[in-house]
Image (cartoon, grey):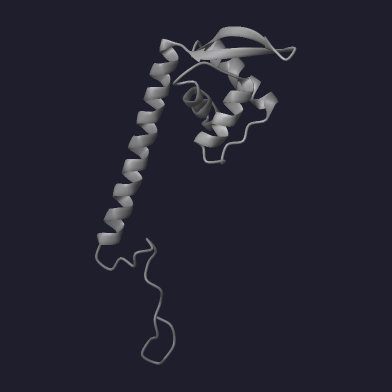
């Protein structure tokens, strides 16, 4: 699952939203790291719809403009949960590996080998 699809599904996890609301939520949920353009958003929405992960909930006209609201399907909830679990497991593995590396004998705390020091003749070892 792409990062954009993950955050779009996450934006829809609690309630149906229209395109602009999804754009805002994706940016907020990702702490600004994912900033979708309108064309990209609708491409993601089309793919998620084709995959059965979201459906059109309703259409409303507000200020003369059509707003389409999308919502998660049961398959969308399951896919989002599975991806969240996968990401959490990966993050947990990375954190464990980092912690193990910091406790290893000779660890420098950076995860890098110790820098060479001066040798017997004053040169680098």
Q: How many marks?
A: 0
Front-most of 73 and 25?
A: 25
Report x, y in % for residue 64. 75, 12
The C terminus appears in which quarter of the rendering?
A: bottom left
**To which quarter of the image does residue 79 belong?**
top left
Please state if 81 lies on the left or on the right of 19 as rendered: left
Query: Can you say whether 52 is above or below 23 in the image?
Result: above
Write the residue at 41% across / 27% down: 83
Looking at the image, the residue that sits furthest to the front is 63
Report x, y in % for residue 17. 55, 18
Write the residue at 51% across / 37% down: 30
**To which quarter of the image does residue 60 belong?**
top right
**To which quarter of the image does residue 105 belong?**
bottom left
Write the residue at 39% across / 34% down: 87
Write the residue at 33% across / 53% down: 98
Query: Can you say whether 116 is above or below 108 in the image?
Result: below
Front-most of 58 and 51?
A: 58
Query: Can you say whether 18 is above or below 92 in the image?
Result: above
Looking at the image, the residue that sits furthest to the bottom is 121
Looking at the image, the residue that sits furthest to the right is 64
Front-most of 31 and 5?
A: 31
Report x, y in % for residue 51. 52, 13
Please state if 121 lies on the left or on the right of 11 as rendered: left
Report x, y in % for residue 84. 39, 29
């Amino acid at each position: 699952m792409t990062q954009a699809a993950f955050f779009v599904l996450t934006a829809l996890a609690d309630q149906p939203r229209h395109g602009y609301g999804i754009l805002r939520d994706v940016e907020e949920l990702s702490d600004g790291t994912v900033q979708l353009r309108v064309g990209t958003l609708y491409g993601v929405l089309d793919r998620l719809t084709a995959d059965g992960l979201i459906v059109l909930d309703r259409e409303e006209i507000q200020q003369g403009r059509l707003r389409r609201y999308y919502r998660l399907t049961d398959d969308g909830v399951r896919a989002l949960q599975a991806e969240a679990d996968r990401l959490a497991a990966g993050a947990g593995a990375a954190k464990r590996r980092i912690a193990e590396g910091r406790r290893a004998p000779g660890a420098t705390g950076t995860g890098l080998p110790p820098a060479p020091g001066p040798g017997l003749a004053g040169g680098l070892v």
